[in-house]
Amino acid sequence: MISVARSDPAPLVGRYFRILFSTLIAAMVALVISGLLWGNPNAHFAHRIGGFWIIPLVISPIFIGVAFILLLLDQTVFRWIVGLKGGSAGLTLILTSLTGLGYFDPVLGTFFAFLLVYWLMTGRVAGRPGWSLNGFVQIAWDEKFYLLFSGFVCAAFLYAFLPVLPQIVFPSNAAGAKTRAHLENPDHWYGKQALSRFPDAVSCLDPEAANSRPTDFQRLDWTQIRHQGDAELCVFRLLAASGGVAQATAWFEAQGFTTGTPWTSDNPYVTDAGHQRVYASWAAWRDGPKYPADPLRRIILHGHVVTIAIEAEYDPTGQTMTDIRISHTIK
């Protein structure tokens, strides 16, 4: 093994990076399995699996060391197991059985689910080189499946993150609360895009409400909301068009938000400056993310959100809305 690595390190380097990538994918899949099988049964499925990508990315430096250990096993123990008659199938069966321990200890079950997925993706073909087009053509159909599955995961992330990438790379310089002046003159790319999509309150409504007379400003079309920038602008526009603070709680309830605590239209919070605030919340852990409408983006971008809170502030008279704040509590 050592002599091969010294004479031609390229295949071993390629193998290492394949192992490293496989550990990240396997960790994500293991967390999905854990959330679906052993997560809170009262939680929305999107919340149960929503954090599947966060933990692997946060602890990704650890996987650099794990991949070295797996590379050593790949060149020795795993290669020996693969060489045994029925060895690969036997280890698959053992790891599958051990994954069942998750019904008693979810952490232990997640660990064995990780090993199982890694074994199916990369371990069961121990000793093979890394990636190459020629190698892909020659490998068996089941290994093609696992490699294509990895590509699908990467494509899903690109699909989910590209529309909101400017919001992540160029965050707003404004405070959490957005005033009318900031919403109408955004200092960030995604805010300007939101402004072009929703130039007025009517553009935020579903088609039937937009054409109704009188206009029903309580029917926000949430299927158009792609990210927090869209939500801030449309919630502000429609609350402002619905009237003063007296109508705010009714508007939130029409969207399905929870009201009543701590401050409502009948009992708004009054700031030192005399401004009046009304609060509402959405239990994303139970009811699923409020936006975006696309299921894949909803799970990847907001599946880890526990609660969405909205704070609407009005001037001392309670007639003019001054700013909006939307915040996410994450697990």
Image: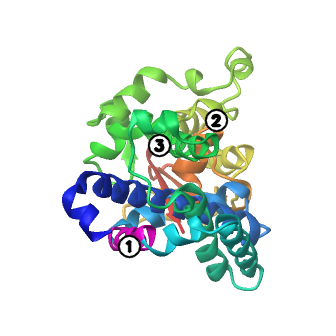
Q: Quadrant of residue 90?
A: bottom right
Q: Secondary structure at mark 3?
A: helix
Identify the main secondary structure in magenta.
Answer: helix
Name the kind of residue labelled 3 in the image.
Cys
**Quarter of the image that includes the N terminus:** bottom left
x 20%, y 58%: residue: 7
Q: Is residue 238 above or below residue 98?
A: above
Mark 3: give few (<14), some (14-19) or many (20+) Cα within 10 Å: few
Can the viewer see residue 121 in this picture? yes
Can the viewer see residue 283 in this picture? no
Give the CA distance from mark 2 to mark 1.
51 Å
Q: Earlier in the sequence, mark 3 or mark 1?
A: 1
Give the CA distance from mark 3 to mark 1.
26 Å
Identity of the residue furthest to the left in this view: 7
- Residue to which mark 1 is pinned: 72
Q: How did the renderer colour the structure?
A: rainbow
Q: Which residues are magenta?
A: 62-75
132 on left or right of 45 = left
